[in-house]
Amino acid sequence: MDNPRLDMQRSAGKLAIFLAGIYLLVLFGVVVSTASGSPIPLIGWPILLLPAAAFTYSIIDAVNLHRVSDIAETTRLWRRSLLLAVAGTGLMVLAVVITNRITPL
């Protein structure tokens, strides 16, 4: 039997994984930029790694969301996963803005 509520909750988990993938692309871009001769200051690296904590727990909850079929557990997991992914995205944007402002031209 197909449960539309469960499908929507799992879609929220997929969105969390997608946002974490975007964060990995940003990190890859910074590494490539640094390797090609446009390095960021040393303080920029810890700032750019701050969102990783939120995305790590978001992905863990998203994976658990796809493994569990209990209604109460899925309700808790999809909200937490999506909330952490949105918080991680906000931190990522903030980290990129801060890093761009401290980078000398």
Image (spheres, rainbow, N blue to C red):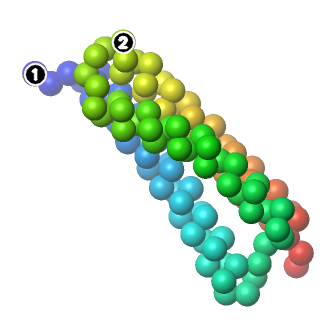
Q: Name the side, left or right, on which 76 lies relative to 7.
A: right
96 to 7, vertically: above or below: below
Residue at x 20%, y 21% (from the top left corner): 3
Amino acid type at circle 2 is: Ala
Tell which residue pokes out farthest to the bottom in this image: 37
Residue at x 67%, y 43% (from the top left corner): 90
Q: Nearer the viewer, mark 2 or mark 1?
A: 2
Name which of mark 2 and mark 1 comes first in the sequence: 1
The residue indicated by pointer 1 is 1
Q: Residues within 10 Å of mark 2 (few under 14, many from 20)?
A: few
The circle drawn on residue 72 is: 2
Residue 13, x across and y down, in percent: 40, 36
Q: Name the side, left or right, on which 26 lies relative to 6.
A: right
Tell which residue pokes out farthest to the left in this image: 1
Tell which residue pokes out farthest to the top in this image: 72
Amino acid type at circle 1 is: Met
Q: Residues within 10 Å of mark 1 (few under 14, many from 20)?
A: few
Q: Name the side, left or right, on which 5 lies relative to 44.
A: left
Residue 63, x across and y down, in percent: 36, 38
